Image (spheres, helix red, strand yellow):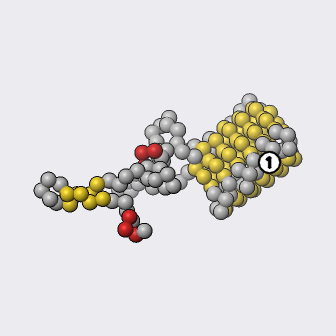
Amino acid sequence: MLSSFGNKKLEKDGAGEPVRVAAAPATAGGPPPLAARPPIAGRPGERLAASVIGPDLTIIGNLVSRGEVQIDGEVQGDIHGTNIVIGERARITGSVIAEEIIVRGHVMGSVRGKRVMLQSSSHVEGDIYHSSLAIEQGAFFEGKSRRSEDPIGGIGKPEVPMAASDPLPMPAQG
């Protein structure tokens, strides 16, 4: 088993010196090769892979994303994003604010989105502010539904701390 660790092959070049050769593509049971994986970071306008909050993760505090977020764990705080999917096993205690929101799990707090969908497994206790609202049969919803042309207007996104890839500000010189 350890003999294949690293999946590297050694071959000899024309002068007889060993040369490393890239490993063969992953087998059907392994992870896809890097070229087949979705991009992690992209250019402006490029759709990024969704961020996932797994079922074993609890976040205490606010969550802010510029892209799509799939939440299957627990969040105790407000969530701001573009597209948010709240999975069946998710438990949210706080506000959810996004352009598009799909709820399959539990939300205790207000929901603000241009397009909001409560699927049959959802359980929402709080007000929903929306431009478009769809509620599937079997969904639980207790609160007020308020239609608005711009339900997320006037609600600013929280300050996002500087990313590690951003350049550091230059100190003032006196």
Indicate the position of residue 168 as horizontal and vertical percent values.
41, 54
The residue carrying mark 1 is 121
Q: Is residue 139 left or right of residue 76?
A: right
Quarter of the figure that contains the C terminus: bottom left
Residue in the foreground of this view, choosing between 54 and 95: 54
Residue in the foreground of this view, choosing between 4 and 59: 4
User: Residue at horizontal 64%, vertical 49%?
Assistant: 70
**Given the current orientation, which residue lies at the most extreme left position?**
15
Indicate the position of residue 87 as horizontal and vertical percent values.
71, 50
Quarter of the figure that contains the N terminus: bottom left
Q: Is residue 170 left or right of residue 153?
A: left
User: Residue at horizontal 78%, vertical 42%?
Assistant: 118
Q: Quadrant of residue 53?
A: bottom right
Indicate the position of residue 91 as horizontal and vertical percent values.
74, 56
Residue 77 at least partly seen: no
Residue 146 at least partly seen: yes
Q: Is residue 12 above or below residue 132?
A: below
Q: Could you tell me the amino acid type at mark 1?
A: Ser
